[in-house]
Amino acid sequence: MSQYRLEARFNGAKTREDTRLDFALHNLSHEPLTGARLGYSSLTRVSDHATVSGADLVRRFANYHEWAMPDGLSVPPSGTWEFAYTGTELHVPKHRTDGPISAVLLRGEEALPVEVGDLACDGGDDSGSRKSVPEGKLDQPILLQPWPAEIAIDAYGPDGRICPAPGSDLDNISALATVAALHGRLFPDHACPLALSDGAAQLAFASNTILAPEEFTLQFDGPEITLAYGDEAGRFYGLVALAQMAHGALSAPETFRFPTRGRIADAPRFAHRGAMLDVSRHFWSLGKVRRFLDTMAWARLNTFQWHLTDDEGWRIEIDAFPELTAAGAVRGPSSELVGQLGYNSQTYGGFYTKAQIRELVAHAALHHVAVIPEIDIPGHCTAVLTALPHLVDPDEKADSYRSVQGYPNNALNPGIPETYDFIDKVMAEVADLFPASWVHVGADEVPDGAWIESPRAMVLAQSEGLSGTAEMQSYFLRRVQQILRSHGKELAGWDEVSHGGGVDQKGTLLVAWQRPELVRGLAEMGYRVVASPGQAYYMDMVQADGWEEPGASWAGTSTPKGTYSFDPEGGLDENERGALAGVQACIWCEYILNPRIFNHMVYPRLYAVAEAGWTPQATRDWQRFAAICHHMPEL
């Protein structure tokens, strides 16, 4: 138990200017507290113009705040240091997780842990709704998610144990063994329905070149099943579908049964069915990332965007720049990067070695998931610029602009030649690690006004005839696109890639995140587009309006039903619907500190996005989805 506890209260104001936060640091030690500083991270940030009482603001860097005790203040055992400020930057608290997340007490060389309570709210405690998913209702007793395109089952049986038919070749038997192992990892406390011998039903395999990639059919004829498939991915998805149905019949026989007569014909709605995981804000071990990939494969998601770099941490080993992981992968009291978004009292972080990355990429490929790395540039680069200060224009004022997250001067400078040498060397190593066609380069949230006070950037702007931040970013990204192509890769990015003139659309993949209607505009520009609107497909958004519900709220409230009900093609005319490459769930981890919160925030909404990517819109059903999702795996 910590000897100190921080509690905070919000006054419930409606405007940033009137927002007041009152803090109480409780001294639970046996010694008086004097001359200390309190550091905490909070997504509600104090304004530069705030009115402060009871403390001195020593430092604010993005979400990190550091307050000093007033001279002469001594807090006795069981006493309290109270301070407050009025005036916040960017937003007003709406949920309990908008307050301090973690804290540290700094006293001389000591960094003492501080317990942190939830942010309380005057008039808002325990008010409002919480996340809710109904029990749902089945129209057929089958555990299958995503739901298939066509299904016609005439009879069911109680058992679902399956083995290969006699004479099956090694490739097919190995494919079945892969899915059996997947089931074993996801459901270690349940019997595996797939075996290499002695099954109640025998499975025959039939490669069928008439079927499209990822397409499969299942024919049930008593104890005999035939799986026809268009390619290896189709075979894998057919086996997963069988494993799901059999798992349901074995694990919940009172609800689910296994087909014995009938047919399923299935193929995906979209080619790109993705999920993005942010491992920069909070580092997830290789085992946790692998487990997440397994849940993706179980839902027939086929693209994993791995958000490996951001302001808060660089998570990929790069031989050319060991400083990136030495200085840019850890944060805390004794690190070059200060604590952000949790774990303030300790050295926190981590990165993936090249050997670990190759292992994960191979694991993903075995389960037909392509891994697209994201190296977020030019913005979101505080970790890079901290580790490699030679990439900073020394003549640019240190706080000439701030990102929406509050980071000062956090974008790579397009006017510094060394910037492109850095990108070339990094992308060469990234391209060698990831066989996917794309490298995602971010390009989001570079604030208007970035580089305007950089003399070196202004020299570039004048020589190239560039006006403003957006055009300079476009110039930068076109050069990055050339670098990527020299390494055999195409550019992917967020929708801001299109700003300021954009890049060559051929081969470029853009993820539309800011609002749903961007899909049409980007497609009209000639870009390949993935729908990932924050209003529906961002897993960090709150799932209910209540104060007690955790998560962000800039895009509103995204209930599980709302996520499921969103039609990614809803804003497109009938003749435009082929323009959408697919869908993607995004898991940003500012609010997601541990697996418990991860499961609350991500599931079942991840499976709702998966079904939008696979199942025809006309055959989707919320009540059926709700009934089945309770039986799907979590992290």
Image: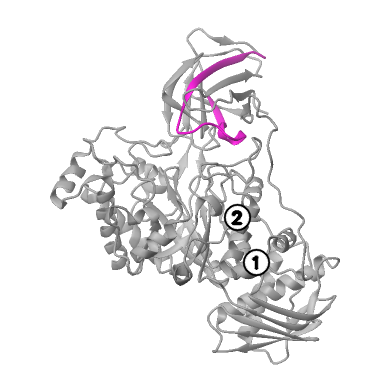
Looking at marks 1 and 2 on the same chain, the residue that comes earlier in the sequence is marked by 2
Q: Is residue 108 visible?
A: no
Image-quadrant location for residue 34: top right
Give the colour scheme of this rendering: one colour
**Left or right placement of residue 332 versus residue 32 in this view:** left
Q: Is residue 242 above or below residue 133?
A: below
Q: What residue sits 28% from the left and 52% below the top?
A: 500
Q: Residue 23: x percent and y percent?
A: 57, 21
Q: Which residue is mark 2?
A: 563
Q: Which residue is under mark 1?
A: 620
Which amino acid type is marked by label 1? Arg
Relative to 425, say whether 115 is above or below: above
Total labels drawn: 2
Disc 1 crowd rating (10 Å Cα; few below 14, some 14-19, many 20+) is some
Above or below, 580 relative to 605: below
The local secondary structure at tag 1 comes to: loop
- Where residue 511 sits: x, y (%)? 44, 59
